[in-house]
Amino acid sequence: MNAPFASLSRRALLQGAGALVVGFSLDPAHAQQAAPVPPAAAPPKLPGSLAGSPYLDSWIRLDSSGAVTVFSGKAELGQGIRTALLQIAAEELDLPIERLTLVTADTGRTANEGYTSGSHSMQDSGTAIRHAAAQVRELLIAEAARRLNLDAAQLKADSGVVVAPNGSKLSYSDLVGTTEQHVKAEPTSRLRDPKTFRIMNTSLRRVDIPAKVTGGEAYVQDMRLPGMLHARVVRPPSYGAQFAGADIEAVAAMPGVVKVIRNGNFLAVVAIREFQAIKAMRTLAASARWNETAKLPVHAPLPEVIAAMPAKDYKILDNHGATEPAVTTVEASYTRPYQSHGSIGPSCAVAHYEGDMVTVWTHTQGVYPDRAAIAEMLRMPPAKVRCIHVPGAGCYGHNGADDAAADAALIAVALPGKPIRLQWMREQEHAWEPYGPGMVTGAKASIDASGKIVDWRFSVRSNTHSMRPGTAGSLLAGQHIENPFPVPEPKPLPLPEGGGDRNAIPIYAFANAEVMHHFIPEMPLRISAMRALGAYMNIFSIESFMDETAAAAKADPVAFRLKHLTDVRARDVITLAAEKFGWDRRLRPVDGRGCGFAFARYKNLAAYCAIAMEVEIDRETGRIHVMRAVSAVDAGQVVSPDGIRNQIEGAILQSLSWTLYEAVTFDDTRITSVDWATYPILRFNSVPLSVDVHIIDRPGLPFLGAGEAGQGPAAAAVANAIADATGQRLRDLPLTSARLKSAIGI
């Protein structure tokens, strides 16, 4: 019952004089009078996110003024989709891109596209917008044909006008005024031929960059509203800590303090100025008393802890085929610690409770799921909560964004009529965000006399990789208030995308293969989605192990991979990366230099990515420096070449940071990696001297998400390069200088 009313409400917002208005067709309720008929075949599925929001005006709106608005339920997180989605719409509408504006992720205006995650923005939203724009263009041409009494096939769209063979023209704005028809999307669209592209497959200046590089208002952290107050929360010092008292009255009397809020274990201060709020928060935290419980597992190394945890076992691949006898078997195990998102800007949100409506500006990656969770926490109808996405500084994955949004909403309800800006402190971000889960993998392979793998066994032990909101129990505030909500039960994410088992099934053609997912329901630390989910660790493991197996077969790593691949597009990216890197001419491992190679197709269904790296090792200090990285990527039809390069370059640098530096630490009670000193990340002086990305365009083929295609291959490429340089294999992430020195005996 909710969906139709929600759609009508949003449509009402879109309706206006002179707009391309879409009506709804309600099926007549005449089934009781009709004779029984065989069930009709299911209609073809609409492309991309049109399947969930099938009306064209969910995606495109043309006004009689000539303005064109594009809507996307996906959020701009720095991946550049604001520019790419505009390019798609402009190309299919045949309009200058300057005529278009884009509205993203807003529960009051855009379609519900769930989370912006899994490199789905182009596949889902980009595909929907492309088809919607193409169909809107055809509607305008049809209306022009009607007015000119011509066949639509004689007309063409060109830069915002429909042109007849005799030169007669009708502008889109002229046509919109009288175009009113049912425009529920069709399963197929007349898409423009890639050979005619003028806007797609070109590198335009990204619309989101200027404010970010000039110190403009780019992020939710920059938002300032009239009459706005500033808030800070006081978090418990550890998981499960119970509030036992604090000097609340003294803090409430501090200069500028407007209110001190206590609701169960949730504490917050609100002040006129931000620094007043920080001072009040510090004072309140210093006086707060908590009852803590020492329950974090530090009695054994983390891999042993993970290996000992109860698990539910799922066999996710079980292939059997005829092969030659095995002559050699190799086996290895790999580990990953808990890792933080390491967001440069602490999480932030602005909330305003006015009348009976709460509006929250947030850098959540899912405005609709976040709205549902906040509404449940506030015990309000979802329609009374509106979440609007605003980019956050350094935001990827499920960091503290949703929790900050909930904090701000809870505080705003306590101070009606006043916009509340809530920002976390650095130590709160590091200690309370949901981490990427710790993982342990095992690999075993047998090769025959020809050097071919004849048996492959792989296992992964991991928790769920998503505890994203949708319910109030996913939110810290929902857990900490006086009548808390239960934390949802962790569940494995279904394949083919998967969670901890993402990319655990190899893309290589092995006649015999078995893959086990040992799903761990409970973990000691708070965890959720971190970029690429389990794919980062599984690809690191598989691609490291492919090198180990190639060494056992005395084969070249690149040739060994090609020997086990039948996917033509996979072979193409490997071949291109090797050629551009000069793999056959690479330096042999001398003087602390080494080269490594790795490849994956993200989720085995998104972009293909191959990466070659050259590293330099300082044996005395253990410093590992990536000298250069060369990548080849196939993301299907290219929309923005620079956008794809940015994605892969960013993926390589992010992965180098995870792979070489990052690990969450804790004692028996508290998280101890609470700042940049205790949680180091990649710094500017460790960035590779060069990162080259080469793109294989596939005109006319579907978009393939590229945002998370590079993290796994980058991790394995650097590990393989280290092994090439030193002769020692590092299998435990992060591959720190200390671990390298220990491995080489320094």
Image: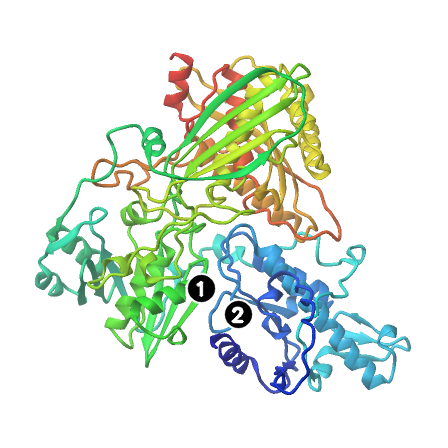
Q: Name the spot of residue 581 as percent of width and height, x first.
A: 66, 28
User: Looking at the picture, how far across and down is residue 83, in whole percent?
Assistant: 60, 58
Q: Which residue is mark 2?
A: 110
Question: Which part of the image, by quadrant, shows the C terminus?
Answer: top left
The CA distance from mark 2 to mark 1 is: 10 Å
In the rendering, at what x and y percent does residue 335 appear? Answer: 41, 30
Q: Which mark is residue 699?
A: none
Vertical side of 404 occupied by 57: above or below: below
Foreground residue, 59 or 165? 59
Task: Tell me the residue that label 1 is attached to.
Answer: 367
What amino acid is labelled 1 in the image? Val
Q: Is residue 597 visible?
A: yes
- Which sits in the foreground, 237 or 593? 237
Judged left or right of residue 506, residue 731 is left
- Please determine whether, in this image, residue 581 is positioned above or below residue 5: above
Residue for point 85% across, 80% down: 168
Q: Mark 1 packing: few (<14 Cα in 10 Å), some, or many (20+)?
A: many
Q: Secondary structure at mark 2?
A: loop
Q: Which is more toward the observer, 738 or 135?
A: 135
Q: State whether residue 344 is above or below residue 450.
A: below
Lower position in the chain sequence, tag 2 or tag 1 = 2
Where is residue 85? Give x, y as percent. Answer: 62, 60
- Contact? badges 2 and 1 (CB < 8 Å): yes
Tell me the crowding category of disc 2: few under 14, some 14 to 19, or many 20 or more residues within 10 angstroms, Cα based.
many
Q: Is residue 608 above or below residue 270?
A: above
Q: Secondary structure at mark 1?
A: helix
